[in-house]
Amino acid sequence: MTSSDGLLAEQRAYYRARAPEYDDWWQRRGRYDRGEAFQTVWENDVADAERALAGFGATGSVIEFAAGTGNWTRHLAKTASHVTALDASPETLAIAASKLERGANLEGGVGEIDRVELVTGDIFGFEPDRTYDVAFMGFWHSHVPADRLESFWALVDRCLAPDGRFFLIDNAHPSLTQGLAGSPLEVHTTGETATSGQGTIDLAGGTAERTLTDGRSFEIVKRYFTPASLAEALGDLGWAVEARTTERFFLVADGRRRDQP
């Protein structure tokens, strides 16, 4: 047991409960609609992240950590020969499966769905039975507690083939949204906390309060990295990293083991 076990259990419960409304956040619908100016920057940043992933070229076999509702799974399946999409929430994976099935119906029953294996399981208890060419993380790395960072990246190492690579997309530091019309975040002058429509973010402690539409509240892990701090943290674990942010919202990074050519 580690000090973060209880927090991780609550985080898993949150994402299971949030499954029906997760895509409202991604599509900026309902309570996540922040107006036209915000929407325009959001869509431009999503397109930037999608181009970065396309340029990376996730070919061969891919393991996707925390696949969620499958927003990135279909992108991966367009270039990969096989995708293992892993998530602790059967509710989010059911939505991902529905998206893949709808895509298959539109495309005549073939395509991405045939290359995707959806696997329900806790990432921290997962052990690969094969090696992969690429490890992908979409909005997962910020949910890894500090006391699990080393063991998680040891898992990535076990998953990857000798010349394997990784790619991650995550939330950029919330301070980047300051001054943007419609931004739901207010970063306090201390730089240690922020508030949003979903609750308080403890920037120093690496946790956040999240509230669902029905009013239920959960505490989850939320650790924000800058490109420099991500490169430093993973460099200490033996990884070579190239990282940047989009205009406002996302951290985008890729890399490989430092001892690879």
Image (spheres, rainbow, N blue to C red):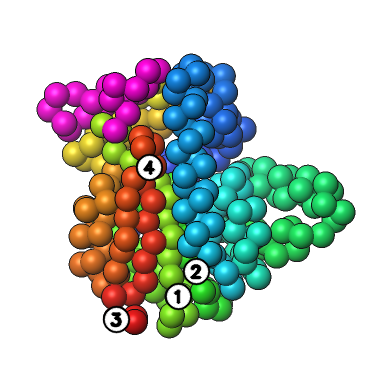
Residue 237 falls in image quadrant: bottom left
SS at mark 4 in the image: loop
Q: Point out residue 135 in the picture as x, y percentages from the top left corner.
A: 48, 65
State yes or no: discs 4 and 1 in contact (Cβ < 8 Å).
Answer: no
What secondary structure is the magenta-colored segment mainly? loop
State yes or no: discs 3 and 4 in contact (Cβ < 8 Å).
Answer: no
SS at mark 3 in the image: loop
Q: Residue 246 carries which label?
A: 4
State yes or no: discs 1 and 2 in contact (Cβ < 8 Å).
Answer: yes
Residue that appears at 59% across and 45% down? 71
Residue that appears at 47% across and 44% down? 48
State yes or no: discs 1 and 3 in contact (Cβ < 8 Å).
Answer: no
Q: Which of marks 1 and 2 is nearer the N terminus?
A: 2
Q: Earlier in the sequence, mark 3 or mark 2?
A: 2
- For mark 2, what is the residue? 134
Residue 175, relative to residue 104: is it above or below?
Answer: above
**Viewer-nearest of labels 3 and 4?**
4
**C-alpha distance separating marks 4 and 1:** 25 Å
**Viewer-nearest of labels 4 and 2?**
4
Q: Earlier in the sequence, mark 4 or mark 2?
A: 2
Residue 182 falls in image quadrant: top left
Q: Give the range drawn in magenta.
A: 176-196
- How crowded pointer 3 is (Cα within 10 Å; few <14, some 14-19, many 20+) is rated as few
Q: Point out residue 118 in the picture as x, y percentages from the top left corner.
A: 65, 58
- For mark 1, what is the residue? 164
* Amino acid type shown at disc 2: Val
Q: Which of marks 3 and 4 is nearer the N terminus?
A: 4
Q: Residue 203 carries which label?
A: none
SS at mark 2 in the image: strand
- For mark 3, what is the residue? 259
